[in-house]
Image (cartoon, rainbow, N blue to C red):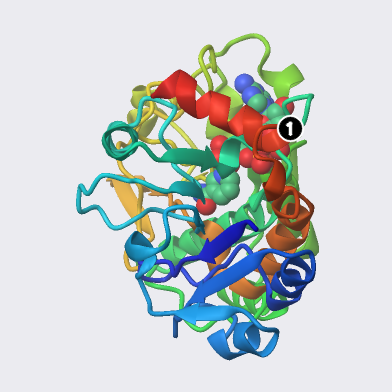
Amino acid sequence: MTHIWLRAEPRHHETRVGLTPAGAAEMLAAGFTVTVEDSTDRCIPTSEYSEVGCGIAPLGSWPDAPLDAIIFGLKELPEDGTPLIHRHIMFGHAYKDQPSGRILLDRFKEGGGTLYDLEYLVDLDGRRVAAFGYWAGYAGSAMSLLAWAAQQNGTGLADVQGVSDASDLQERIATALNGQKPTTLIIGALGRVGTGAADLCKALGLSVTGWDIAETASGGPFPQVLQHDIFLNCILARHGTPVFVPASTVTDPRKLRVIGDIACDPDSDFSPIKVYDRATTWASPVLRVHDAPPLDVMAIDNLPSLLPRESSEDFAAQLLPHLLGLDNLGDGVWERARSEFSAHL
Ligand SMILES: NC(=O)c1ccc[n+]([C@@H]2O[C@H](COP(=O)([O-])OP(=O)(O)OC[C@H]3O[C@@H](n4cnc5c(N)ncnc54)[C@H](O)[C@@H]3O)[C@@H](O)[C@H]2O)c1
């Protein structure tokens, strides 16, 4: 009987979850054992999981879970260097030469555990089977618009707290913009992130230019990036990705004031944005990389957590059919994710 262990997320401001109580009930009915760590931060209360029959474990107790349990979380594990002995389903951010990724992989190597990286859970065509992209795009577009509005008022964007849902967020942006209409260029416009980013701009009646592979095929340079108020990077960077924003941009004549790097791979060599080197945080959402004229970069790496309930329900619905296939780890999406792990170990 396969045992799935839903761990709590240790990171501040991360309240998303990859399995809903309704999904847990389906797994229980299919014969899985489902353990859920208690968490007061999770956007779905622990009581809803116990009501459907899940076992409840103390917060952060997964290191003591039975060896055969599959530990399921979304974002990073506590960085305490301990060897990882279990099988883990999570976003590892470990395969694109990120320094923190190498540390994580070494912990797996030492403990003999396995990483099933959610980013590499793909179908036969290489397309991801479950992603938070749409809501990442929506939230990243929102944070970038709020950053632009704050800049017009001569202030920096502070922590955005207490957003109840997408319509609340949209109203807040409309109020902040106060009738101003910044122009936005989205690269990666045909993807999940790009679609969410564009949908919010369109809902607010703002002008959006959408580019995808065809428009960047020349390899650059791309002076059009400088001719928009906001640039949203929504691509999946890989070897050969052209540079969209070279280091010289900060001092170039430009209309550009805010870069929303929603793809957010600042420590990858493949990153197409060369004006900054670290992710930003909810407490400090933008990094000012130039004054006079200002240029702010918004690069938060867990953007969907701005709208935890919507994004969790969407992601969990996409993933559930595959979680129900966890009995057969040696095949399909799980086997492809394991072989990706082996290739990077
Ligand atoms: N910051 C966050 O919180 C967060 C959350 C979710 C996803 N992401 C990241 O966002 C990125 C995009 O994810 P997605 O789910 O939308 O992927 P996706 O595959 O659905 O879409 C990516 C799009 O980018 C396009 N693209 C790729 N290379 C391009 C290029 N050189 N020029 C122009 N277009 C190009 C593709 O054609 C595709 O349409 C990923 O890197 C993902 O890790 C970030």
Image position of 40 (left or right of 321): left
Residue closest to the eye, 223 or 80: 80
- Label 1, secondary structure: give it: helix
Quadrant in the picture for residue 164: bottom right
Mark 1 CB within 8 Å of ligand 1: no
Residue at 42% over, 60% down: 66
Query: Quadrant where the N terminus lies?
Result: bottom right
Residue at 68% over, 51% down: 197
Q: Position of residue 258 (x, y in %)?
A: 47, 48
Residue at 46% over, 66% down: 7
Name which residue type carries label 1.
Answer: Gly
Q: In what quadrant does ligand 1 lie?
A: top right
Residue closest to the eye, 225 or 110: 110
Q: Position of residue 55 (x, y in %)?
A: 55, 79
> Is residue 39 placed above or below 345 in the rendered structure?
below
Q: Position of residue 28 (x, y in %)?
A: 72, 71
Identify residue for label 1: 332
Residue 27 seen in this snapshot: yes
Residue 178 seen in this snapshot: no
> Is residue 79 placed above or below 316 in the rendered structure?
above
Residue closest to the eye, 101 or 328: 328
Residue at 58% over, 60% down: 3
Q: Which class describes the residues within 10 Å of circle 1: few (<14), some (14-19), or many (20+)?
A: some
Query: Quadrant where the C terminus lies?
Result: top left
Quadrant in the picture for residue 281: bottom left
Tally the numbered discs. 1
> Is residue 26 placed above or below 187 in the rendered structure?
below
> Is residue 108 placed above or below 27 in the rendered structure?
above
Q: Position of residue 247 (x, y in %)?
A: 34, 25
Residue at the front extreme? 1
